[in-house]
Amino acid sequence: MNKQTLIVIGNGMVGHHFLEQLIATAAAERFDIKVFGEEKLLAYDRVHLSEYFGGSTHADLAMGTAQWYAENRIDLHLGEQVTAIDRDQKTITTPLGNYRYDELVLATGSYPFVPPIKGNEHPHCLVYRTLEDLDRIRASADGVKTGVVVGGGLLGLEAANALKSLGVDAHVVEFAPRLMPVQLDADGGALLRRKIEELGVQVHTEKATIEIVDGESARLRMNFSDDSHLETDLIVFSAGIRPQDTLARASGLDIGERGGIVINDQCTTSDPHIHAIGECALWSERIFGLVAPGYTMARTLAATLNGDQEAAFTGADMSTKLKLLGVDVGSIGDAHGQTPGARNIRFNDEKAGHYRRMVISDDGKTLLGAILVGDNSHYDTLLQYALNGITLPDNPETLILPESQGGAPALGPDALPETASICSCHNVTKGDICGAIDAGCSDLASVKGETKASTGCGGCAALLKNVVDNELEKRGVEVSKDLCEHFPYSRQELFHLVKVNGIRTFRTLIRDHGKGHGCDICKPTVASILATCWNEHILATDHVPLQDTNDTFMANMQKNGTYSIVPRIPGGEITPDKLIVLGEVANEYNLYTKITGGQRVDLFGATLSELPAIWEKLIAAGFETGHAYGKSLRTVKSCVGSTWCRYGVQDSVGMAIFLENRYKGLRAPHKVKMAVSGCTRECAEAQSKDIGVIATENGWNLYVCGNGGMRPRHADLFATDLSDEELIRTIDRVLMFYVRTADRLQRTSVWMENLEGGLDYLKQVVLEDSLGLGQELEEHMESLVGTYQCEWKTAVEDPEKRKRFREFVNAPEKTDPVQQWTTERDQRRPVLESEAAL
Amino acid sequence: MKARTTWDCVCKVEDLVAESGVAVWTADGPVAVFYLPHRLPALFAISHTDPFSGSNVLARGITGDIKGEPVVASPLYKQHFSLITGQCLEDETVKIKTYPVLLDGDQIRLEVPKNKQETAAA
């Protein structure tokens, strides 16, 4: 069968989502797919556009990669604007030529509405929509004092945030009497205004701009209809969007009276071979200016093209929950109470700055809508009541009252029906989550991976966790936070108990706060906590029996009971003399030698009793323990950097050695890996590490919470262009916060994903010091750095500690009879079970 | 007929490590001796050989209690073995040898089969 050609015009969030959905179906095989994008950049996340000024790059915001398009054989034409559609010939035209289609998808999105004000063509009058727009705003705001956003809606406030982050005095000018007139009422709008003004953004409501002229104290002056005026250096219009329907209009497709390409429930236009999705589409006389409905349309169309006759777009919930300039705002359903007979319940705490309004049906049984300002903690529960028509309790006001005043706890996940939508971005219901758990998912991370729930905007993270925990519990899976049967506390809680009460031994802790004698779960955990708090030698008498064997003997046990030895080689830099010593020691003890992935050398096959003698030789040659056995810093990998490499811009080896020496020995909930790359080519693979540092012309970019292993995770960009001092301070804080708050055996990636608020929250804590912990974290790290000791050096010098390394305490000359050896590729290795049987 | 046994001195009190184990070589092969000072009795002896890997490592495991039963966790694959019965808690078909053990002055004595000792000594 000859393949048909499917052309998608527009490469935004919805266009990209459509392709992802289509590729996942069998229909993908039927089509040769071509994509045309007017912008030169691959589809990116417009919802988080303002993060572009916070250090995010296009790569951070990108929805997919060129590689993904190539792998799925999608022919990508970026920066190639489609100028015409010929429906009779079934072709489209671009400046580069004509292309035939069998099916055409319009995902052209929208453009910002610029009110017809005299003077709006001034070069410092801008809009807020694309990354190019943001570059223009940045250029215009460079070195000036004041910026105005016209439009006090959702996007306008985002734009104001962007201006604020560029360091200009931001003003918002709104035509309506309040901010966010679509989502909020008068009281909610007033509270939002107060909070935003407290953050230094000035708000001007009920202002109609009649003209923009040259200013006296600034570039521009805006004259308002009430004879007042405002001087500003730039103006950003963010007064709403209009569907981008120019192409469709010119080709004669049905267009709505006020714009928008008319579509049916299958997202097909008045031409059966042309479809439209996202903000350019008009469904049932409505334009949907949010990403979630656009995604729903994308899914519907992909299913329809795959032959699903049932697939239909049936409208979308326009409820929104967001943080605008750090202020919680939520709006659900019929927020203004326009349903006949609707009644209101309001809670307004002006002191705390919390406003909540419920709109309920006239019989008091159903929640029709709600408004929240200042605190979104009630949003999830209210949304579930509204979306699923759950009958309200007899005293519905308890849903929005503070708990101290008789407020009800949040709606339990059990009360939700199977059809309840948990994640609206990816359309995941409670039923889908139960299905994933029944199919074998046994924790939050695997449910997320399977269903994609909470991987869109992330707004449902807390609710998802509740549902997953609850369902797992119902199936008998232990999700208790208790560490084990001996301690009814999480690792973090134990950390606080140890720290606050100055507890220095396991015995005291279990006597005062636990029961029984401990086990192989709690003992190493407590040992790690004690090490973080007090940093005593891990072989101090009280601590010996707490450690895993690898920590006890400071080497890694292999399957035949022998150990491997990994001396520290900071940054992977080693002198020939030291390399020779490694070779001599390996030769003397007949150790199998292998280079590790972390730029060091691993020596295998040492017996327990050989370890101290081997380490004596290594220490004499200047080696230190590499902590390859510990839940602690492993290595800091590096490339050669500016010293040798013609591309390097900083001394990556020097920085890697510094970092490795600073954090060596730090006990953590899990192993910690780092890397430093000397330029953006990233030869040290820093973005797959817990802490990744990449040199820039101006300093260092810091990436956090990546890992390789079973579930690889790309690290997130955390801060850019840091000086050496800033870099160290930031890493100190991130690491110490991780060590103090993570669960047992939780790597930084999972830890960060489980922090409520995720990366943004971590940034607030570390970069903005929102908890006021910064100094304490730094001082704690400094004290650990100051009390570092090489555990092996201390051990070999202490006869009592050396006694632990006897293979058999009553037969020092005896060698373990099960250890049998053979030779392979000129090195000694254990005889395998299969070989021994022969 | 009851097998003939002997109470051999395997080590001194000072060789033991509180809350942990040491390995000793006996006529019956390698044995792990644990000293849990907060229990009565405080001494336990089980085979040093981990039945899942065949390696001699159990004395290097972490001790503790699971629902009141004193146990050691294998340092290789983390199964728990009762220090009293030798029963593996994760696999009811696996049980390792245990040995009577007592404190005699400053000496730790184990009861091991005698005939084997003669073989070993020969």
Image (spheres, rainbow, N blue to C red):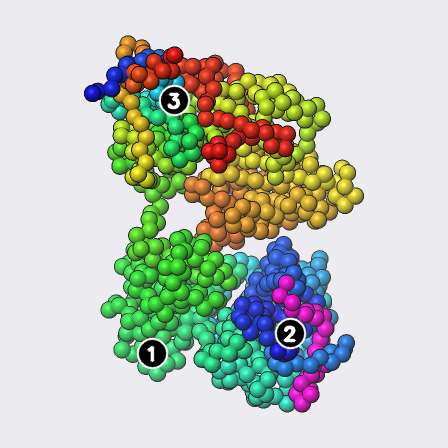
Q: Earlier in the sequence, mark 1 or mark 2?
A: 2
Q: Give the distance between the C-alpha atoms of the residues marked 3 and 2, in whole angstroms.
A: 69 Å
Mark sitting on residue A694: none
Quick check: is A419 in the magenta stretch?
no
Q: Are marks 3 and 2 on the same chain?
A: no
Question: Residue B94: x, y in percent?
Answer: 32, 36
Q: Is residue A511 visible?
A: no
User: Which three-letter amino acid code belongs to the residue tagged 2?
Assistant: Asp
Mark sitting on residue A32: 2
Quarter of the image that includes the N terminus of chain B: top left
Chain letter of the residue carrying label 2: A
x 28%, y 14%: residue = B6
User: Which three-letter amino acid code belongs to the residue tagged 1?
Assistant: Ala
Question: Residue A474: x, y in percent?
Answer: 30, 56
Q: Which residue is mark 1?
A: A342
State which mark lies toward you, 3 or 2: 3
Classify 10 Å Cα crowding around label 2: few (below 14), some (14-19), many (20 and above): some
Residue at the far front in the pictured view? A838
Discs 3, 2 touching: Cβ within 8 Å: no
**Which is nearer the eye, A351 or B30?**
B30
Label 3: which secondary element:
strand
Question: Residue A717: x, y in percent?
Answer: 60, 51
Highlighted range, magenta? A71-93
State which mark lies toward you, 3 or 1: 3
